[in-house]
């Protein structure tokens, strides 16, 4: 898919995330990927599994009572709702810890130091590779979640001199606007043409997907395709509904309409 062309004056400047040292983060940070899961996904899972944790807490409370312990904690956990609530909270914390550890150890981003003109590939907690900015041969990336960014590096100190030796892969380049803006900043710093903002690319990708679906629906009915449908989706829907009614015998057929 070719990137849509928009006037430079209408392109907002990139707003990437930066480290405390001022380095540009190409790709999403651990925090950006972890917070949505920790605050939305994992609590839902914890609530669904809270009955199992509540049963365990009930067994623990019963054993404490049989041992002669009847303190404030045992009294607070007497209601079933308190056991379920505590079980959900404990599961939430446990799942959040389990999710954080592998994410930190496998996270991969590229750090761009604009002042020094250097790049660093970080894998987990360590720097796996370094390169000067002048070795960047290309830098491309997907604007939607699940995509990756590819950064090609060459041997020579200037592009066009030397053979490309290695390629850095940055997962989730289109995680959010800030992650993709890190790639756009790298492209600008390396002297490459920066990609349009992520919102523009996502909107164009969805438009192309809708157009492809509309073409398939029209082909199934034998409906003639018009270029105006690319720009006017309402016109396509109206004509598509009319063709369906015509094929169903609820509307008169026109000369250009497909035969039932």
Image: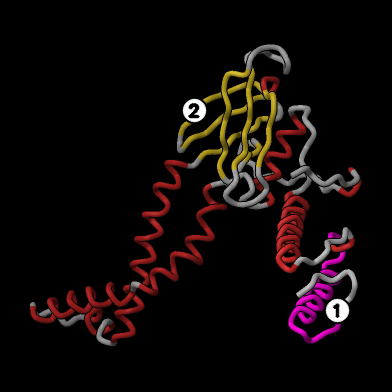
Which is in the foreground here, disc 2 or disc 1?
Answer: 1
Main secondary structure along the magenta-highlighted residues:
helix
- From the top left corner, tell me how far across and down residue 24 is, in percent: 66, 38
- From the top left corner, tell me how far across and down residue 164 is, in percent: 62, 19
Q: Which residue is mark 2?
A: 128
Q: Is residue 75 above or below residue 204?
A: below
Q: Which quarter of the rendering shows the N terminus?
A: top right
Q: Is residue 105 above or below residue 42?
A: above
> Mark 2, residues whose alpha carbon is within 10 Å: few (<14), some, or many (≥20)?
few
Sequence order check: which comes first, mark 2 or mark 1?
Answer: 2
**Magenta includes 107?**
no
Left or right: residue 160 versus residue 96 is right
Q: Which residue is mark 1?
A: 253
Q: Residue at x 83, y 84 (%)?
A: 251
Bounds of the magenta span? 230-252
Disc 2, SS: strand
Q: Work out whether residue 7 or residue 244 is closer to the camera in this orientation and state it.
A: 244
């Amino acid at each position: 898919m070719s990137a849509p062309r928009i006037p430079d004056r209408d392109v907002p400047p990139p707003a990437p995330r930066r480290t405390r040292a001022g380095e540009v983060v190409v790709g999403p940070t651990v925090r950006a990927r972890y917070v949505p899961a920790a605050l939305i996904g994992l609590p839902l899972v914890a609530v669904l599994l809270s009955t199992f944790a509540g049963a365990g807490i009930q067994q623990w409370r019963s054993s404490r009572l049989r041992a002669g312990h009847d303190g404030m904690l045992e009294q607070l956990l007497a209601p079933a709702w308190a056991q379920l609530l505590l079980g959900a909270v404990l599961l939430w914390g446990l799942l959040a810890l389990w999710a954080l550890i592998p994410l930190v150890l496998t996270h991969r981003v590229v750090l761009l130091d604009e002042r020094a003109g250097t790049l660093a590939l970080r894998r987990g907690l360590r720097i796996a590779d370094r390169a000067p900015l002048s070795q960047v041969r290309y830098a491309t990336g997907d604007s939607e979640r699940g995509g990756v960014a590819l950064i090609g590096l060459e041997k020579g100190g200037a592009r066009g001199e030397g053979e490309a030796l290695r390629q850095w892969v940055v997962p989730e380049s289109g995680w959010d606007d800030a992650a993709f803006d890190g790639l756009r900043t790298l492209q600008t710093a390396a002297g490459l043409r920066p990609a349009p903002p992520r919102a523009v690319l996502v909107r164009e990708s969805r438009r192309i997907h809708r157009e492809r679906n509309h073409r398939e629906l029209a082909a199934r009915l034998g409906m003639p395709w018009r270029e105006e449908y690319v720009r006017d989706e309402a016109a396509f829907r109206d004509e598509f509904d009319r063709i369906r009614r015509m094929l169903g015998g609820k509307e008169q057929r026109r000369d250009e309409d497909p035969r039932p």
